[in-house]
């Protein structure tokens, strides 16, 4: 076996094999690159980067949707001793804010991205971001299309050492001060070697993943560890999985995949899709031997449910392996021993203080019972210990802080020496920020230290409260979050429950009363506030940002919601919630009318073979008339009248503003979108926005009639006679008068 000391060795060794990566574009469209081809394409991209002015030691932020292009750019950076910085793509202001703050933290950054992403970046508004900053970003941006062009191969750097930074993995949490984890070649090779060894990967294995490559589980646990062992990889775009979740297991069956990867979300998502599938499913998943579950808190109930329901497709009940990791350890800290079934421990929630020994109970129905899942044993090169608040090591089955050390653990954060020092103990162990206990050599995670709720001397884990509300009130786990906050030294710690709810209605008031009642009955705790939030903030890896919710609460961001809730509570007293039948009936009638299907069931998936884009547009238009604004993606995620009605009940109704007619003028100011387009055009002048098409007309053609028809269309629509021009130093749009 060839030895790999750097990631360059990993790819070059893999290039000697006959295997590679299959990029899945759809159910019938796939493209396969051998590792040798990937190496060659990466060298072409390296040439383009070097020609653009990128040198060894510079940083390249990668924001590319296409997985094949992403990997070409990533490996080009590795080969050129350029530091790749993968960053998740997002449309929200927080994602743009994070990208800008990452940019500021780097020494000599470049950006490689899709064209549309740079334009979206120009829509980001912040007092911190100046026009000059935008122009600097634009001038050092290379679009992905140009980055992967095959013109000539670049010059590989021959002075790459194991201790050099391979790439920077920015933590998925804070957008204000993102932390860039430095990962050396030695760190990464150690971790992927441990993962491959623990997984017992052989040449016979075939892996499949839908996880984004900007996520450590997708890039390191899946791609790099499989490249190390030179096995065949199958990569499904995350967006395609979201649109068509069944394709994940369809492709696993088709390609006889043996290694799969998914957080809880993926398991829950595909189960929902299976239950609503209209056509018979004929998968054979008997070749799957490992499915790693990580990246978010693991639900043992969901794991069991997943295995039970997937058994019909010949999926073994022993393939699910929960693991634990963090960016500071590359990705993995612990993984189960292959062949060992996953375990769940039931313990008394009243004995979970730091330094306290756990008290096991019989099952989930025992008094004060709460459950935690075992996440495997420490990897060979990553020792784990449990310590108290003063970093003293605790014995087996004692709750404490999880600390790690080893060849895969980062030496620190990029350009952040103070934070780097704060994360280390005096004897150089890394503080993970997580709590847990060891159980006969295996690790059990109980929660995040900063999320622990301490009220009246009692330690409560947020997931305990959330699980109770899920079980008793059927609130979805991802829509309810428990936190605690202290307004100042004169106030005691308060228990807060945040619920994803856009509309504060009578129904929501009833939910508030139910929440307070259940938490009091089950835990003898008083809930001070139940707060409606439009969305639950999460990291790019799907973890809930408790800290952000608390900070927003303390800053007074939710005062308006709290005031409105209080006023409505006072009005209602004994009243029952609103009857939502009217909305159900309206949606049901609209769907049946548009689909021309009088037998459409309330819970029936309406995306049939007869459903098309025109019907989708018509459905969105009718929903808009009801006062709700939703996207086509939301429509596809709520694919029945029942799901759509439930979703809309949590949204605010909006009054559509009429479009006012303005007086005719010679010149008009540019819209925000037109300004962005104009600015981008100055940086990269092209006709990329001009979409051309060719039509062929058969039969007798009358050129004069055709010309007159086209003139009539142009004369009727001002937008077809509009030009941009400079007037008194300002860019304006001018409508050319219609021809006579």
Image: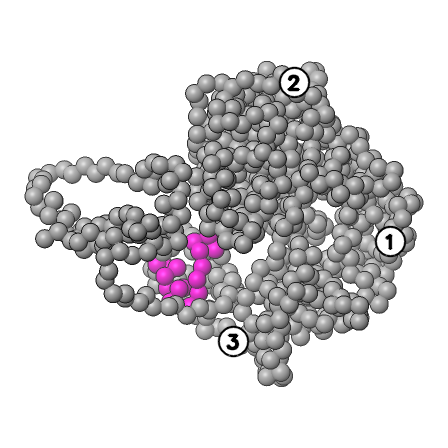
Cα separation between marks 2 and 1: 47 Å
Q: Are marks 3 and 1 in contact (CB under 8 Å)?
A: no
Point out residue 173 in the picture as x, y percentages from the top left corner: 65, 48
Graded by Cα atoms within 10 Å as few (under 14), some (14 to 19) or many (20 or more), the crowding at tag 1 reads many
Q: Residue at x 80, y 49 (%)?
A: 435
Point out residue 36 in the picture as x, y percentages from the top left corner: 54, 18
Q: How many marks?
A: 3
3 or 1: tag closer to the N-terminus: 1
Q: Are marks 2 and 1 in contact (CB under 8 Å)?
A: no
Q: Nearer the viewer, residue 177 or 522?
A: 177
Q: Which residue is mark 1?
A: 354
- The span shown in magenta is 618-634
The label number, if any, that marks residue 579 in the structure image: 3
* Residue 689 seen in the current view: yes
Q: Secondary structure at mark 3?
A: loop
**Is the magenta region chiefly helix, strand or loop?**
helix
């Amino acid at each position: 076996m060839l030895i790999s000391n750097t990631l360059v060795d990993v790819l070059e060794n893999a290039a000697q094999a006959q295997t590679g990566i299959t990029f899945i574009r759809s159910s019938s469209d796939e493209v396969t690159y051998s590792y040798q081809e990937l190496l060659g394409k990466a060298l072409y991209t390296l040439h383009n980067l070097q020609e653009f002015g990128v040198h060894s030691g510079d940083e390249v932020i990668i924001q590319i949707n296409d997985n094949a292009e992403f990997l070409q750019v990533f490996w080009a950076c590795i080969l050129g001793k350029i530091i790749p910085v993968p960053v998740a793509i997002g449309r929200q202001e927080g994602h743009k804010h994070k990208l800008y703050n990452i940019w500021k933290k780097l020494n000599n950054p470049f950006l490689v991205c899709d064209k549309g992403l740079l334009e979206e970046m120009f829509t980001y508004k912040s007092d911190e971001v100046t026009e000059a900053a935008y122009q600097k970003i634009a001038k050092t941006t290379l679009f992905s299309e140009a980055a992967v062009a095959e013109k000539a191969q670049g010059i590989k750097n021959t002075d790459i050492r194991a201790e050099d930074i391979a790439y920077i993995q920015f933590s998925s949490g804070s957008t204000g001060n993102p932390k860039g984890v430095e990962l050396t070649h030695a760190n990464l090779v150690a971790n992927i070697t441990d993962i491959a060894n623990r997984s017992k990967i052989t040449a016979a294995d075939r892996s499949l993943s839908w996880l984004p490559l900007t996520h450590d589980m997708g890039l390191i646990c899946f791609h790099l560890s499989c490249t190390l062992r030179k096995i065949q990889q199958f990569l499904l775009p995350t967006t395609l999985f979201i649109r068509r979740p069944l394709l994940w297991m369809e492709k696993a069956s088709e390609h006889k995949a043996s290694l799969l990867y998914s957080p809880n979300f993926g398991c829950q998502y595909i189960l929902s899709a299976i239950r609503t599938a209209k056509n018979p499913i004929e998968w054979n998943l008997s070749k799957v031997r490992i499915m790693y579950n990580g990246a978010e808190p693991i639900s043992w109930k969901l794991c069991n449910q997943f295995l039970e329901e997937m058994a019909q497709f010949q999926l073994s009940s022993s393939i699910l392996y929960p693991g634990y990791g963090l960016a500071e350890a590359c990705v993995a800290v612990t993984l189960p021993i292959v062949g060992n079934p996953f375990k769940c421990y039931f313990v008394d929630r009243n004995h979970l203080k730091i330094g306290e020994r756990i008290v096991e109970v019989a099952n989930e129905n025992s008094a004060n019972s709460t459950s935690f899942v075992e996440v495997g044993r420490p990897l060979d090169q990553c020792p784990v210990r449990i310590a108290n608040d003063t970093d003293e090591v605790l014995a087996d089955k004692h709750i404490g802080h999880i600390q790690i050390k080893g060849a895969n653990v980062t030496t620190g954060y990029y350009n952040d020496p103070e934070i780097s020092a704060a994360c280390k103990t005096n004897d150089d162990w890394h503080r993970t920020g997580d709590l847990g206990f060891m159980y006969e050599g295996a690790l059990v995670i109980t929660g995040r230290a900063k999320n622990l709720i301490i009220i009246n001397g009692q330690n409560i884990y947020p997931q305990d409260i959330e699980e109770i509300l899920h079980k008793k009130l059927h609130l979805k786990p991802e829509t309810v979050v428990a936190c605690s906050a202290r307004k100042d030294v004169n106030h005691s710690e308060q228990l807060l429950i945040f619920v994803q709810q856009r509309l504060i209605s009578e129904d929501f008031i009833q939910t508030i009363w139910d929440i307070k009642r259940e938490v009091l009955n089950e835990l003898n705790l008083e809930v001070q506030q139940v707060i409606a939030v439009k969305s639950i903030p999460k990291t790019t890896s799907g973890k809930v940002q408790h800290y952000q919710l608390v900070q927003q609460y303390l800053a007074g961001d939710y005062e308006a919601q709290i005031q409105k809730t209080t006023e409505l509570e006072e009005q209602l007293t004994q009243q029952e919630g609103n009857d939502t039948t009217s909305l159900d009936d309206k949606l049901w009638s609209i769907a049946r009318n548009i689909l021309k299907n009088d037998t459409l069931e309330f819970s029936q998936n309406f995306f049939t073979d007869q459903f098309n884009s025109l019907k989708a547009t018509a459905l969105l238009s009718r929903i808009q008339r009801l006062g709700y604004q939703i996207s086509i993606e939301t429509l596809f995620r709520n694919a029945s009248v029942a799901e759509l009605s439930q979703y809309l009940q949590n949204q605010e109704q909006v009054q559509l503003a009429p479009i006012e007619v303005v007086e005719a003028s010679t010149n008009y100011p540019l819209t925000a979108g037109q300004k962005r387009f104009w600015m981008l055009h100055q940086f990269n002048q092209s006709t990329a926005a001009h979409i051309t098409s060719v039509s062929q007309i058969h039969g007798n053609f009358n050129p004069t009639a055709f010309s007159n028809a086209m003139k009539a269309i142009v004369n009727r629509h001002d937008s077809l006679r509009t030009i941009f021009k400079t007037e008194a130093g300002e860019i304006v749009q001018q409508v050319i008068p219609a021809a006579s």
